[in-house]
Image (tube, rainbow, N blue to C red):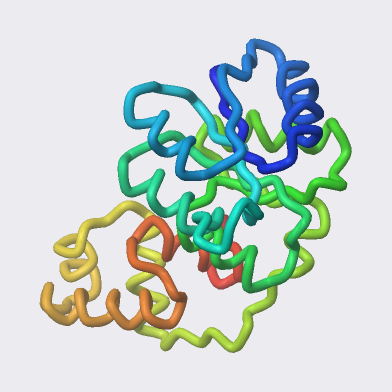
Amino acid sequence: MKIIIVDDHAVVRMGLRAVLESVAGASVVADFARAEDAINWLRAHSVDLVVMDLRFRQDENAMDGITAVRKIREMDGPPVLVVTTYGSEPEILGALAAGAAGYVLKDADTAELQRAVVAAASGEQFLGTGVEAQIHQGGVELTNREMDVLRLVAQGKTNAGVAEALFLSAATVKTHLNRIFDKLGVNSRTAAVATARSLGLLEE
């Protein structure tokens, strides 16, 4: 398992490298202080996982972690595990909506971080101790029909498949999906399902 680390603190990068390389078969092949540098590097290299902080302090124009997660997912890059000190609900939901595969706080113990790495690299979502407790429904309310659509999307059905199952037109399904995206603050089916699960709206 090849991993890169993105964090603007050199000491943190060193500590993460030690923990990550204690995972069987894992190797940290590069580390970066800026999200932009990591993204540019990923355009020419392939890895299995990105471990990244949420905020970078170099300058006010530095790319933040949530934007970086979104860009990496848009370029069909590897899964991104967020490891950060920032554990507020907006930050967690923002990262998950952007496509993060997991979210762990830096005060997590070594065993939890190791589990998070294995899960995220395997495509499973992992929320660390204390993270899940921060996530509440936050006023997100989907109609019964929107929930019907979302459950079928979570099962892997296409718009046409959802339309057939619910006896709706494809256009109506698309309208429902757009409303779901707006309410959840996401822009893709995958992010909608992941966010809904994180909010407790959908079962795993």
Is residue 187 or residue 32 the one in the foreground?
32
Q: Is residue 195 above or below residue 4?
A: below
Q: Is residue 88 above or below residue 7?
A: below
Q: Position of residue 91 (x, y in %)?
A: 63, 66
Q: Quadrant of residue 113?
A: top right
Q: Position of residue 33 (x, y in %)?
A: 61, 38
* Residue in the picture at 75% in, 30% down: 16
Residue at the far top in the pictured view? 25
Q: Quadrant of residue 52?
A: top right
Looking at the image, residue 70 sits to the left or right of residue 168; the answer is right
* Residue in the picture at 17% in, 76% down: 167
* Residue in the picture at 37% in, 80% down: 182
Q: Is residue 122 above or below residue 153?
A: above
Looking at the image, residue 199 sits to the left or right of residue 66; the answer is right
Q: Quadrant of the N terminus?
A: top right
Is residue 114 or residue 154 the one in the foreground?
114
Q: Is residue 49 above or below residue 35?
A: above
Number of on-image labels: 0
Q: Quadrant of the C terminus?
A: bottom right
Q: Position of residue 65 (x, y in %)?
A: 55, 54
Looking at the image, residue 93 sits to the left or right of residue 68; the answer is right
* Residue in the picture at 55% in, 35% down: 50
Q: Position of residue 95 (x, y in %)?
A: 55, 59
Is residue 67 or residue 112 the one in the foreground?
67
Is residue 37 or residue 28 the one in the foreground?
37
